[in-house]
Image: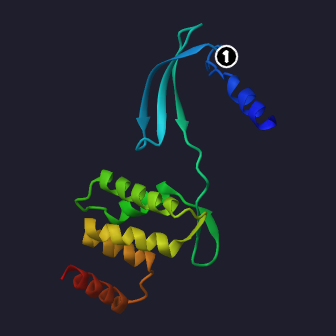
C-alpha cells in the first residue's frame, strides 16, 4: 500500500518548465521533435506570460558506460572523443561525417546491449576497426596504426597483409 501511494504522489505533481526570462511557471509546447537518432526530444516552448520562446531538450538518462584502458585506468565512454579519432583517420578521404556518426552510434548501441557497465578499450577498438574497414581501408589502417601503436614498419606491413587476406 505504501508503494502505491508513493507512485500516486510522485506522478500527481505536475512540474512546470519555468520561463528563463520572467520565471513564470506557465509555458506551452509549440513543437516537439526527436533528435540524436530519437534518443532525445527537442521541445520549442513559449511563455504564456511574456511570450518569450525557448528550446528545451528531454533525454533519457543512461547508466554510465566505463571504458577500461590498457594501463588499467577507467574513463566514461565518450562518443565525441571516438568520433574525433575517426574524423582524424578519415581526413582527406571520401567518407561522409554521417557514416562516422552512424558507426559511433552502432558501437555504442552494441556496447550498451551487452548490459555491462565496464568494457575494455580493446573491445571498443576492435568493434570500431571491424566497421571502419568496411567503410574505408586507408582510414582503417590509419586508425589501427594509432590504436595498436605500431612499433615499426613490419607490424604495419603485417596489418596490411591481414587486410588483404580479409578482402579475398
**In x, y percent, where is residue 67?**
57, 67
Residue beneath the point at 34% across and 92% down = 154
Outermost residue toward the right in this view: 2
Give how far across and how far down residue 9 sits, in percent. 75, 27
Whole-percent x, y for residue 82 in the image: 46, 61
- Quarter in which the C terminus is drawn: bottom left
Direction from residue 115 to residue 83 in the image, left or right: left
Examine the image and state in which quarter residue 71 appears.
Answer: bottom right
Pick the front one: 96 or 12: 12
Using residue 114 as the reference point, say whether residue 155 is left or right of it. left
> Quadrant where the N terminus lies?
top right
149 or 43, which lies in front?
43
Examine the rendered structure and indicate whether residue 112 appears above or below residue 48.
Answer: below
Q: In the current view of this chain or complex, which residue is farthest to the top?
A: 49
* 124 sits left or right of 96 in the view: right
Residue at numbered disc 1: 23
Residue found 27% across the figure and 81% down from its top: 163
**Left or right: 94, with 70 as reference point:** left
Amino acid at each position: 500500500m505504501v508503494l502505491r501511494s508513493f507512485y500516486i504522489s510522485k506522478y500527481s505533481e505536475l512540474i512546470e518548465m519555468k520561463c528563463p526570462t520572467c520565471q513564470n511557471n506557465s509555458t506551452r509546447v509549440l513543437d516537439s521533435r526527436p533528435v540524436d537518432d530519437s534518443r532525445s526530444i527537442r521541445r520549442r516552448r513559449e511563455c504564456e506570460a511574456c511570450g518569450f520562446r525557448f528550446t528545451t531538450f528531454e533525454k533519457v538518462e543512461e547508466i554510465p558506460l566505463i571504458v577500461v584502458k590498457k594501463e588499467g585506468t577507467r574513463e566514461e565512454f565518450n562518443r565525441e572523443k571516438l568520433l574525433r579519432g575517426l574524423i582524424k583517420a578519415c581526413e582527406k578521404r571520401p567518407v561522409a561525417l554521417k557514416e562516422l556518426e552512424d558507426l559511433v552510434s552502432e558501437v555504442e548501441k552494441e556496447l550498451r546491449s551487452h548490459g555491462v557497465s565496464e568494457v575494455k578499450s580493446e573491445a571498443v577498438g576492435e568493434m570500431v576497426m571491424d566497421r571502419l574497414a568496411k567503410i574505408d581501408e586507408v582510414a582503417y589502417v590509419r586508425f589501427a596504426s594509432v590504436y595498436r601503436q605500431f612499433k615499426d614498419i613490419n607490424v604495419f606491413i603485417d596489418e596490411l597483409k591481414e587486410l588483404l587476406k580479409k578482402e579475398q
